[in-house]
Amino acid sequence: MGSIGRYMFRTTIGAFVITLVTLTILIWFTQAMHNFDLITSERQTLLVFIGITGLAIPMLVMMLAPFALVIAAGHVLNKLSADSEIIVMNAAGISPWRLLKPFLAAALLVSLLVAALAIYISPRSLRELRDWATQVRADILTNIVQPGHFTTIGGNLTFHIADRRPDGLLTGIFVDDRRDPNEHTTYLAERGEIEKNPNGSFLVMQSGSIQRLAAGQRDPRIVTFDRYAFDLSKFTAGPQNSIYSEHEKYIWELLWPNPHDPTYVAQPGQFRSELYDRIADILYPLTFIILTYAFLGPPQTTRQNRTLAMLAMIGVISLLRVIGFISVIVGVRVPAVLGVQFVALIATTAVGVWLIARSRAIEPAVAVSKLATALSNRIAQATAS
Protein backbone atom coordinates (compact mmCIF):
# COMPACT_ATOMS: atom_id res chain seq x y z
CA MET A 1 0.00 0.00 0.00
CA GLY A 2 2.98 2.30 0.57
CA SER A 3 3.61 4.93 3.21
CA ILE A 4 1.05 7.35 1.74
CA GLY A 5 -1.60 4.65 1.62
CA ARG A 6 -0.89 3.54 5.19
CA TYR A 7 -1.12 7.14 6.38
CA MET A 8 -4.45 7.64 4.64
CA PHE A 9 -5.77 4.31 5.97
CA ARG A 10 -4.77 5.09 9.58
CA THR A 11 -6.23 8.58 9.39
CA THR A 12 -9.50 7.33 7.90
CA ILE A 13 -9.93 4.56 10.47
CA GLY A 14 -9.09 6.95 13.32
CA ALA A 15 -11.64 9.50 12.12
CA PHE A 16 -14.17 6.69 11.56
CA VAL A 17 -13.84 5.41 15.13
CA ILE A 18 -14.19 8.89 16.63
CA THR A 19 -17.21 9.71 14.46
CA LEU A 20 -18.91 6.36 15.08
CA VAL A 21 -18.41 6.53 18.85
CA THR A 22 -19.73 10.10 18.98
CA LEU A 23 -22.82 9.40 16.89
CA THR A 24 -23.57 6.17 18.75
CA ILE A 25 -23.32 7.79 22.18
CA LEU A 26 -25.60 10.66 21.16
CA ILE A 27 -28.32 8.41 19.76
CA TRP A 28 -27.90 5.79 22.51
CA PHE A 29 -28.35 8.45 25.18
CA THR A 30 -31.67 9.62 23.74
CA GLN A 31 -32.89 6.01 23.48
CA ALA A 32 -31.66 5.04 26.94
CA MET A 33 -33.68 7.78 28.59
CA HIS A 34 -36.88 6.04 27.47
CA ASN A 35 -35.98 3.08 29.70
CA PHE A 36 -34.77 5.10 32.68
CA ASP A 37 -37.99 4.74 34.69
CA LEU A 38 -38.11 1.03 33.99
CA ILE A 39 -34.58 0.54 35.29
CA THR A 40 -34.96 2.69 38.39
CA SER A 41 -38.12 0.87 39.38
CA GLU A 42 -35.92 -2.21 39.83
CA ARG A 43 -33.48 -0.19 41.98
CA GLN A 44 -30.56 -1.17 39.75
CA THR A 45 -27.18 0.55 39.79
CA LEU A 46 -25.99 2.94 37.12
CA LEU A 47 -23.63 0.28 35.75
CA VAL A 48 -26.50 -2.18 35.36
CA PHE A 49 -28.57 0.50 33.65
CA ILE A 50 -25.75 1.24 31.19
CA GLY A 51 -25.18 -2.46 30.59
CA ILE A 52 -28.82 -3.20 29.82
CA THR A 53 -29.47 -0.19 27.59
CA GLY A 54 -26.12 -0.82 25.94
CA LEU A 55 -27.58 -3.97 24.41
CA ALA A 56 -29.07 -1.74 21.71
CA ILE A 57 -25.64 -0.36 20.74
CA PRO A 58 -24.72 -3.10 18.20
CA MET A 59 -27.85 -2.30 16.18
CA LEU A 60 -27.02 1.42 16.28
CA VAL A 61 -23.44 0.76 15.19
CA MET A 62 -24.68 -1.38 12.29
CA MET A 63 -26.91 1.48 11.09
CA LEU A 64 -24.42 4.31 11.66
CA ALA A 65 -21.16 2.72 10.49
CA PRO A 66 -21.59 3.47 6.73
CA PHE A 67 -22.40 7.12 7.43
CA ALA A 68 -19.51 7.43 9.90
CA LEU A 69 -17.22 6.08 7.19
CA VAL A 70 -18.46 8.71 4.72
CA ILE A 71 -17.82 11.48 7.26
CA ALA A 72 -14.34 10.11 8.03
CA ALA A 73 -13.35 9.72 4.37
CA GLY A 74 -14.76 13.16 3.54
CA HIS A 75 -12.73 14.67 6.38
CA VAL A 76 -9.50 13.03 5.19
CA LEU A 77 -10.05 14.04 1.56
CA ASN A 78 -10.88 17.62 2.52
CA LYS A 79 -7.76 17.77 4.67
CA LEU A 80 -5.62 16.48 1.81
CA SER A 81 -7.22 19.01 -0.53
CA ALA A 82 -6.80 21.92 1.87
CA ASP A 83 -3.08 21.08 2.22
CA SER A 84 -2.82 20.76 -1.60
CA GLU A 85 -1.62 17.18 -1.20
CA ILE A 86 -4.18 15.84 -3.67
CA ILE A 87 -2.97 18.30 -6.30
CA VAL A 88 0.67 17.37 -5.68
CA MET A 89 -0.02 13.63 -5.86
CA ASN A 90 -2.09 14.11 -9.00
CA ALA A 91 0.70 16.18 -10.61
CA ALA A 92 3.23 13.48 -9.65
CA GLY A 93 1.24 11.01 -11.74
CA ILE A 94 -0.07 8.87 -8.90
CA SER A 95 -2.97 6.77 -10.18
CA PRO A 96 -6.38 7.48 -8.62
CA TRP A 97 -6.72 3.74 -8.01
CA ARG A 98 -3.63 3.83 -5.84
CA LEU A 99 -5.13 6.63 -3.76
CA LEU A 100 -8.44 4.77 -3.60
CA LYS A 101 -6.86 1.59 -2.16
CA PRO A 102 -6.57 2.76 1.48
CA PHE A 103 -10.19 3.96 1.43
CA LEU A 104 -11.32 0.64 -0.04
CA ALA A 105 -9.37 -1.18 2.67
CA ALA A 106 -11.13 0.91 5.31
CA ALA A 107 -14.50 0.25 3.66
CA LEU A 108 -13.81 -3.49 3.58
CA LEU A 109 -12.98 -3.41 7.29
CA VAL A 110 -16.22 -1.56 8.03
CA SER A 111 -18.18 -4.01 5.86
CA LEU A 112 -16.74 -6.91 7.88
CA LEU A 113 -17.78 -5.14 11.08
CA VAL A 114 -21.30 -4.59 9.75
CA ALA A 115 -21.45 -8.22 8.58
CA ALA A 116 -20.53 -9.52 12.05
CA LEU A 117 -23.17 -7.27 13.60
CA ALA A 118 -25.87 -8.20 11.06
CA ILE A 119 -25.23 -11.94 11.18
CA TYR A 120 -24.95 -12.53 14.92
CA ILE A 121 -24.01 -9.73 17.32
CA SER A 122 -26.96 -7.36 16.79
CA PRO A 123 -29.73 -10.01 16.93
CA ARG A 124 -28.05 -11.60 19.94
CA SER A 125 -28.00 -8.28 21.79
CA LEU A 126 -31.61 -7.51 20.86
CA ARG A 127 -32.63 -10.95 22.15
CA GLU A 128 -30.95 -10.29 25.47
CA LEU A 129 -32.67 -6.91 25.65
CA ARG A 130 -36.09 -8.41 24.88
CA ASP A 131 -35.63 -11.24 27.41
CA TRP A 132 -34.76 -8.77 30.13
CA ALA A 133 -37.56 -6.33 29.22
CA THR A 134 -40.11 -9.16 29.06
CA GLN A 135 -39.09 -10.38 32.49
CA VAL A 136 -39.26 -6.93 34.03
CA ARG A 137 -42.56 -5.93 32.48
CA ALA A 138 -44.15 -9.25 33.36
CA ASP A 139 -43.13 -8.97 37.01
CA ILE A 140 -45.84 -7.04 38.80
CA LEU A 141 -43.46 -6.27 41.65
CA THR A 142 -41.78 -3.62 39.51
CA ASN A 143 -45.13 -1.82 39.28
CA ILE A 144 -46.01 -2.21 42.94
CA VAL A 145 -42.92 -0.42 44.21
CA GLN A 146 -43.58 2.89 42.47
CA PRO A 147 -44.29 5.54 45.13
CA GLY A 148 -47.44 7.60 44.68
CA HIS A 149 -48.90 5.39 41.93
CA PHE A 150 -52.10 3.37 42.19
CA THR A 151 -51.53 0.10 40.36
CA THR A 152 -54.64 -1.92 39.53
CA ILE A 153 -54.41 -5.56 38.45
CA GLY A 154 -57.34 -7.12 36.67
CA GLY A 155 -59.64 -4.31 37.78
CA ASN A 156 -60.13 -5.73 41.29
CA LEU A 157 -56.77 -5.53 43.08
CA THR A 158 -55.14 -2.17 43.74
CA PHE A 159 -51.71 -1.38 45.29
CA HIS A 160 -50.32 1.93 46.53
CA ILE A 161 -47.29 2.94 48.58
CA ALA A 162 -46.32 6.35 49.92
CA ASP A 163 -42.55 5.99 49.65
CA ARG A 164 -39.77 3.54 48.91
CA ARG A 165 -36.48 3.96 50.76
CA PRO A 166 -33.06 3.16 49.27
CA ASP A 167 -32.80 0.01 51.43
CA GLY A 168 -36.01 -1.35 49.86
CA LEU A 169 -38.31 -0.56 52.80
CA LEU A 170 -41.83 0.46 51.73
CA THR A 171 -43.89 2.90 53.79
CA GLY A 172 -47.56 3.85 53.75
CA ILE A 173 -48.83 0.61 52.18
CA PHE A 174 -52.39 0.33 50.90
CA VAL A 175 -53.87 -2.80 49.27
CA ASP A 176 -57.50 -2.97 48.15
CA ASP A 177 -58.66 -6.51 47.32
CA ARG A 178 -62.03 -7.01 45.58
CA ARG A 179 -61.29 -10.37 43.97
CA ASP A 180 -63.77 -12.19 46.20
CA PRO A 181 -67.33 -11.07 45.30
CA ASN A 182 -68.48 -12.03 48.78
CA GLU A 183 -65.88 -10.01 50.66
CA HIS A 184 -64.09 -6.68 50.20
CA THR A 185 -60.70 -6.60 51.97
CA THR A 186 -58.45 -3.61 52.60
CA TYR A 187 -54.90 -3.85 53.97
CA LEU A 188 -53.17 -0.88 55.61
CA ALA A 189 -49.62 -0.98 56.96
CA GLU A 190 -47.05 1.51 58.16
CA ARG A 191 -44.19 -0.28 56.42
CA GLY A 192 -43.23 -3.46 54.63
CA GLU A 193 -40.90 -5.01 52.11
CA ILE A 194 -40.81 -7.49 49.24
CA GLU A 195 -39.44 -10.90 50.11
CA LYS A 196 -38.71 -13.71 47.67
CA ASN A 197 -38.01 -17.27 48.77
CA PRO A 198 -38.46 -20.79 47.38
CA ASN A 199 -42.12 -20.67 48.42
CA GLY A 200 -42.85 -17.61 46.29
CA SER A 201 -42.92 -13.81 46.45
CA PHE A 202 -44.57 -11.97 49.31
CA LEU A 203 -45.35 -8.42 50.38
CA VAL A 204 -44.53 -8.60 54.08
CA MET A 205 -46.40 -5.81 55.90
CA GLN A 206 -45.71 -4.64 59.45
CA SER A 207 -47.77 -2.67 62.00
CA GLY A 208 -51.05 -2.54 60.15
CA SER A 209 -54.65 -3.65 59.96
CA ILE A 210 -56.98 -5.69 57.77
CA GLN A 211 -60.54 -4.52 57.13
CA ARG A 212 -62.94 -7.15 55.82
CA LEU A 213 -66.43 -6.16 54.70
CA ALA A 214 -68.70 -9.07 53.87
CA ALA A 215 -71.35 -8.70 51.18
CA GLY A 216 -74.59 -7.33 52.63
CA GLN A 217 -72.90 -6.05 55.81
CA ARG A 218 -72.60 -2.38 56.80
CA ASP A 219 -69.67 -2.55 59.24
CA PRO A 220 -66.29 -4.12 58.44
CA ARG A 221 -64.37 -6.48 60.67
CA ILE A 222 -60.99 -4.99 61.59
CA VAL A 223 -57.99 -7.08 62.56
CA THR A 224 -54.67 -5.54 63.53
CA PHE A 225 -51.36 -7.27 62.98
CA ASP A 226 -47.68 -6.84 63.72
CA ARG A 227 -46.60 -8.80 60.65
CA TYR A 228 -48.60 -10.12 57.70
CA ALA A 229 -47.45 -11.72 54.43
CA PHE A 230 -49.53 -11.03 51.32
CA ASP A 231 -48.88 -13.66 48.64
CA LEU A 232 -47.80 -12.16 45.32
CA SER A 233 -46.61 -15.34 43.65
CA LYS A 234 -49.55 -15.56 41.26
CA PHE A 235 -48.77 -12.05 39.96
CA THR A 236 -45.04 -12.47 39.44
CA ALA A 237 -43.39 -13.60 36.25
CA GLY A 238 -42.79 -17.24 35.64
CA PRO A 239 -40.61 -18.62 32.87
CA GLN A 240 -40.92 -16.36 29.84
CA ASN A 241 -41.14 -17.75 26.33
CA SER A 242 -40.11 -14.78 24.26
CA ILE A 243 -41.25 -14.62 20.65
CA TYR A 244 -38.49 -12.93 18.73
CA SER A 245 -39.22 -10.51 15.91
CA GLU A 246 -37.46 -10.56 12.54
CA HIS A 247 -34.94 -7.98 13.80
CA GLU A 248 -33.93 -10.40 16.56
CA LYS A 249 -33.45 -13.40 14.28
CA TYR A 250 -29.99 -14.60 13.33
CA ILE A 251 -29.34 -14.34 9.61
CA TRP A 252 -29.49 -18.11 9.13
CA GLU A 253 -32.95 -18.06 10.71
CA LEU A 254 -33.96 -15.57 8.04
CA LEU A 255 -32.42 -17.68 5.29
CA TRP A 256 -34.04 -20.90 6.50
CA PRO A 257 -36.97 -19.87 8.70
CA ASN A 258 -38.78 -22.37 10.88
CA PRO A 259 -42.12 -23.03 9.13
CA HIS A 260 -43.76 -23.39 12.56
CA ASP A 261 -42.45 -20.05 13.86
CA PRO A 262 -45.59 -17.98 14.67
CA THR A 263 -43.84 -14.77 13.63
CA TYR A 264 -42.88 -16.22 10.26
CA VAL A 265 -46.32 -17.74 9.72
CA ALA A 266 -47.97 -14.38 10.44
CA GLN A 267 -45.57 -12.17 8.46
CA PRO A 268 -43.30 -14.05 6.04
CA GLY A 269 -42.74 -10.84 4.08
CA GLN A 270 -41.09 -9.22 7.10
CA PHE A 271 -38.52 -12.04 7.25
CA ARG A 272 -37.69 -11.69 3.54
CA SER A 273 -37.45 -7.90 3.79
CA GLU A 274 -35.20 -8.09 6.86
CA LEU A 275 -32.88 -10.55 5.12
CA TYR A 276 -32.47 -8.31 2.06
CA ASP A 277 -31.91 -5.28 4.27
CA ARG A 278 -29.11 -6.93 6.24
CA ILE A 279 -27.35 -8.07 3.08
CA ALA A 280 -27.59 -4.53 1.69
CA ASP A 281 -26.20 -3.11 4.95
CA ILE A 282 -22.98 -5.04 4.32
CA LEU A 283 -22.63 -3.52 0.83
CA TYR A 284 -23.30 0.11 1.72
CA PRO A 285 -19.79 0.93 3.09
CA LEU A 286 -18.13 -0.12 -0.19
CA THR A 287 -20.60 1.82 -2.35
CA PHE A 288 -20.44 4.89 -0.11
CA ILE A 289 -16.65 5.02 -0.13
CA ILE A 290 -16.52 4.82 -3.94
CA LEU A 291 -19.06 7.63 -4.24
CA THR A 292 -17.18 9.71 -1.66
CA TYR A 293 -13.92 9.37 -3.55
CA ALA A 294 -15.59 9.97 -6.92
CA PHE A 295 -16.92 13.32 -5.69
CA LEU A 296 -14.09 14.49 -3.40
CA GLY A 297 -11.01 12.56 -4.58
CA PRO A 298 -10.12 14.46 -7.78
CA PRO A 299 -8.58 17.95 -7.33
CA GLN A 300 -11.16 20.73 -7.59
CA THR A 301 -10.52 24.02 -9.37
CA THR A 302 -12.08 26.20 -6.68
CA ARG A 303 -13.21 25.89 -3.08
CA GLN A 304 -16.75 26.62 -4.19
CA ASN A 305 -16.71 23.70 -6.60
CA ARG A 306 -15.49 21.44 -3.81
CA THR A 307 -18.34 22.56 -1.56
CA LEU A 308 -20.86 21.89 -4.32
CA ALA A 309 -19.29 18.47 -4.94
CA MET A 310 -19.66 17.64 -1.25
CA LEU A 311 -23.31 18.72 -1.26
CA ALA A 312 -23.92 16.60 -4.37
CA MET A 313 -22.24 13.62 -2.66
CA ILE A 314 -24.45 14.01 0.41
CA GLY A 315 -27.51 14.23 -1.81
CA VAL A 316 -26.66 11.08 -3.79
CA ILE A 317 -25.82 9.06 -0.67
CA SER A 318 -28.98 10.22 1.09
CA LEU A 319 -31.09 9.38 -1.95
CA LEU A 320 -29.48 5.95 -2.16
CA ARG A 321 -30.30 5.23 1.48
CA VAL A 322 -33.87 6.50 1.09
CA ILE A 323 -34.32 4.14 -1.86
CA GLY A 324 -33.12 1.33 0.39
CA PHE A 325 -35.59 2.22 3.16
CA ILE A 326 -38.50 2.47 0.74
CA SER A 327 -37.65 -0.80 -1.01
CA VAL A 328 -37.51 -2.62 2.34
CA ILE A 329 -40.85 -1.19 3.46
CA VAL A 330 -42.69 -1.73 0.19
CA GLY A 331 -40.95 -5.06 -0.36
CA VAL A 332 -42.83 -6.58 2.56
CA ARG A 333 -45.91 -6.73 0.34
CA VAL A 334 -44.28 -6.56 -3.11
CA PRO A 335 -41.19 -8.84 -3.07
CA ALA A 336 -39.97 -7.65 -6.46
CA VAL A 337 -39.31 -4.18 -5.02
CA LEU A 338 -36.65 -5.61 -2.69
CA GLY A 339 -34.28 -5.83 -5.64
CA VAL A 340 -34.51 -2.09 -6.30
CA GLN A 341 -31.96 -1.17 -3.64
CA PHE A 342 -29.46 -3.68 -5.05
CA VAL A 343 -29.96 -2.27 -8.54
CA ALA A 344 -29.37 1.21 -7.10
CA LEU A 345 -26.25 0.04 -5.24
CA ILE A 346 -24.76 -1.65 -8.31
CA ALA A 347 -25.63 1.25 -10.63
CA THR A 348 -24.18 3.96 -8.39
CA THR A 349 -21.07 1.88 -7.73
CA ALA A 350 -20.56 1.40 -11.48
CA VAL A 351 -21.02 5.13 -12.12
CA GLY A 352 -18.60 5.93 -9.31
CA VAL A 353 -15.95 3.58 -10.70
CA TRP A 354 -16.41 5.13 -14.16
CA LEU A 355 -15.98 8.65 -12.74
CA ILE A 356 -12.84 7.60 -10.87
CA ALA A 357 -11.45 5.99 -14.04
CA ARG A 358 -11.91 9.33 -15.86
CA SER A 359 -9.80 10.95 -13.14
CA ARG A 360 -11.72 14.18 -13.52
CA ALA A 361 -13.42 16.28 -10.92
CA ILE A 362 -17.20 16.46 -10.97
CA GLU A 363 -17.69 20.08 -11.91
CA PRO A 364 -21.09 21.68 -11.30
CA ALA A 365 -23.09 23.06 -14.19
CA VAL A 366 -22.56 26.69 -15.11
CA ALA A 367 -26.05 27.61 -13.92
CA VAL A 368 -25.42 25.96 -10.55
CA SER A 369 -22.12 27.77 -10.16
CA LYS A 370 -23.73 31.12 -10.96
CA LEU A 371 -26.54 30.44 -8.49
CA ALA A 372 -24.04 29.46 -5.78
CA THR A 373 -22.00 32.60 -6.45
CA ALA A 374 -25.09 34.80 -6.26
CA LEU A 375 -26.16 33.22 -2.99
CA SER A 376 -22.65 33.61 -1.55
CA ASN A 377 -22.59 37.29 -2.50
CA ARG A 378 -26.02 37.88 -0.96
CA ILE A 379 -24.97 36.17 2.27
CA ALA A 380 -21.73 38.17 2.37
CA GLN A 381 -23.64 41.46 1.84
CA ALA A 382 -26.20 40.56 4.53
CA THR A 383 -23.41 39.69 6.97
CA ALA A 384 -21.52 42.90 6.22
CA SER A 385 -24.63 45.03 6.75
Image: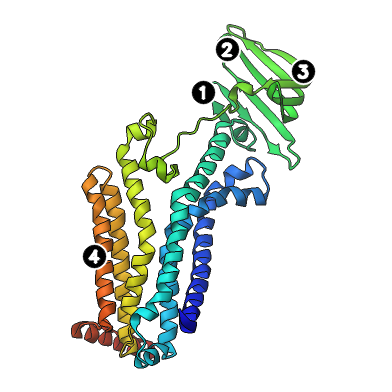
Name the residue type under label 4.
Ala
* Mark with earlier residue (3, 2): 2
- The residue to which callout 4 is attached is 347
Q: Contact (CB < 8 A) between labels 1 and 3? A: no
Name the residue type under label 1.
Gly
Q: Is residue 134 left or right of residue 43?
A: left
- The residue to which callout 2 is attached is 180
Residue shown at 49% from the left, 64% from the top: 23
| Distance CA(mark 2)–CA(mark 1) | 12 Å
| Distance CA(mark 3)–CA(mark 2) | 21 Å
Name the residue type under label 3.
Thr
Q: Is residue 300 left or right of residue 207?
A: left
Q: Is residue 376 left or right of residue 49?
A: left
| Distance CA(mark 1)–CA(mark 3) | 26 Å
Q: Is residue 165 left or right of residue 277?
A: right
Q: Position of residue 315 (x, y in %)?
A: 30, 70
Camera-side mark, 1 or 4: 4
